């Protein structure tokens, strides 16, 4: 059996999927990156191998996410693509006529606008966490509930309250006030869902034409409270595709399948999970930009460098 691997390495989570020749998801993983991207990539490859039937042949591998270049070097990727492209390809695989993609992850949120299957516009959150999953994680902790309980409790709300969710600091003080005056936990939770969607639409999606079909993906799509508020705000049904939390990795796997047509894969094998890597960085003094260049090596041999505004340090053979 031939499979195609997709790896999406973000600052909070790492996703690894394996697709078969029919582009169906055979196995998928959702791991915490925990500030250790190399170890998490290696752990993801080791675990996905255990989930696959023995004797499978990896015919292609693709990477995406904020650590996509690092993951590409470690795994030996056939293609490295940005998150916008990977998430769009993943969504189009399940909803071919999608026109709007809402993607809310742990630290990043984005909106992707497509027309006739082509990305025409996109937007991403900047430095504020009030429109991302970390906002909900933090507030759930404040209310002493698990993130899994959040959505089901929120949709039990009868009289939602308005939470000042423009900033997580203000949200906390507003939540304390609402608790002190006796509002129920369910009403406060629904208010938090409303605050996140309000922030998302007023910042990430500001000025974007959100036409249906709308696909909602990313880890926050598990939250039924957010889904309901989003449907009410956009006044259209929201489609949550299967494997929505791994959509970037699925897109990377699909792109890898395209990339290896007519040639062999560059995948280094599952054995890379045993290799000891070392990352360092230095300041490039070639020009006034003084870029910080990241460097990956093993056994004293430099495998790749990246991070500059130009490509003078990038010595990887992986095609972008």
Image (cartoon, helix red, strand yellow):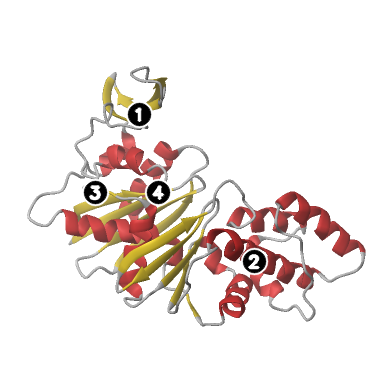
Residue 311, image x, y percentages: 27, 31
Question: Callout 3: helix, strand or loop?
Answer: strand
Compared across the picture, whether 127 is left or right of 138 comes to: left
For the point 58% across and 46% down, the residue is: 127
N-terminal of the pair, mark 2 or mark 1, is 2
Which residue, given by chain and number where applicable, does mark 3 sit on? Answer: 79
Could you give the CA–CA distance between mark 3 and mark 1, rounded to whole angstroms?
A: 21 Å
Residue 36, image x, y percentages: 47, 37
Tell me if label 2 and label 4 are in contact, CB under 8 Å. Answer: no
Nearer the observer, disc 2 or disc 1? Answer: 2
The answer to whether residue 78 shows anywhere in this view is yes
Compared across the picture, whether 181 is left or right of 171 comes to: right
For the point 40% across and 49% down, the residue is: 65
Could you give the CA–CA distance between mark 2 and mark 4, rounded to whole angstroms?
A: 25 Å
Could you give the CA–CA distance between mark 2 and mark 1, rounded to whole angstroms?
A: 43 Å
Query: 173 or 119, which is in the foreground?
Result: 119
Which residue, given by chain and number where applicable, does mark 4 sit on? Answer: 65
N-terminal of the pair, mark 3 or mark 1, is 3
């Amino acid at each position: 059996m031939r499979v195609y691997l997709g790896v999406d390495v973000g600052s909070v989570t790492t996703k690894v999927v394996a697709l078969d020749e029919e582009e169906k998801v055979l196995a998928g993983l959702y791991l915490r990156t925990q500030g250790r991207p190399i170890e998490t990539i290696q752990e993801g490859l080791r675990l996905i191998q255990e989930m696959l039937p023995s004797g499978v042949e990896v015919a292609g591998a693709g990477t995406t996410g904020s650590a996509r270049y690092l993951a590409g070097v470690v795994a030996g990727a056939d293609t490295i693509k940005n998150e916008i492209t990977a998430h769009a390809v993943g969504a189009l695989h399940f909803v071919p006529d999608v026109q709007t993609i809402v993607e809310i992850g742990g630290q990043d949120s984005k909106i992707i606008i497509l027309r006739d299957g082509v990305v025409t516009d996109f937007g991403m959150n900047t430095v504020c966490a009030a429109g991302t999953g970390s906002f909900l994680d933090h507030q759930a902790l404040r209310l002493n509930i698990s993130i899994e309980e959040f959505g089901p409790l929120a949709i039990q709300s009868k009289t939602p309250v308005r939470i000042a969710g423009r900033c997580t600091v203000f949200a906390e003080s507003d939540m304390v006030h609402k608790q002190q005056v006796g509002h129920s936990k369910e009403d406060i939770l629904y208010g938090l869902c409303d605050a996140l969607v309000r922030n998302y639409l007023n910042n990430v999606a500001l000025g974007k034409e959100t036409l249906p079909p709308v696909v909602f993906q990313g880890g926050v799509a598990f939250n039924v409270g957010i889904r309901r508020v989003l449907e009410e705000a956009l006044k259209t049904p929201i489609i949550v595709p299967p494997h929505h939390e791994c959509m970037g990795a699925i897109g990377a796997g699909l792109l890898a399948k395209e990339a290896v047509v007519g040639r062999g894969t560059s995948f280094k094998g599952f054995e890379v999970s045993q290799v000891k890597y070392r990352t360092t960085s230095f300041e490039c003094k070639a020009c006034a930009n003084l870029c910080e260049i990241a460097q990956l090596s093993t056994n004293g041999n430099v495998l790749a460098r990246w991070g500059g505004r130009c490509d003078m340090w990038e010595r990887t053979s992986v095609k972008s």
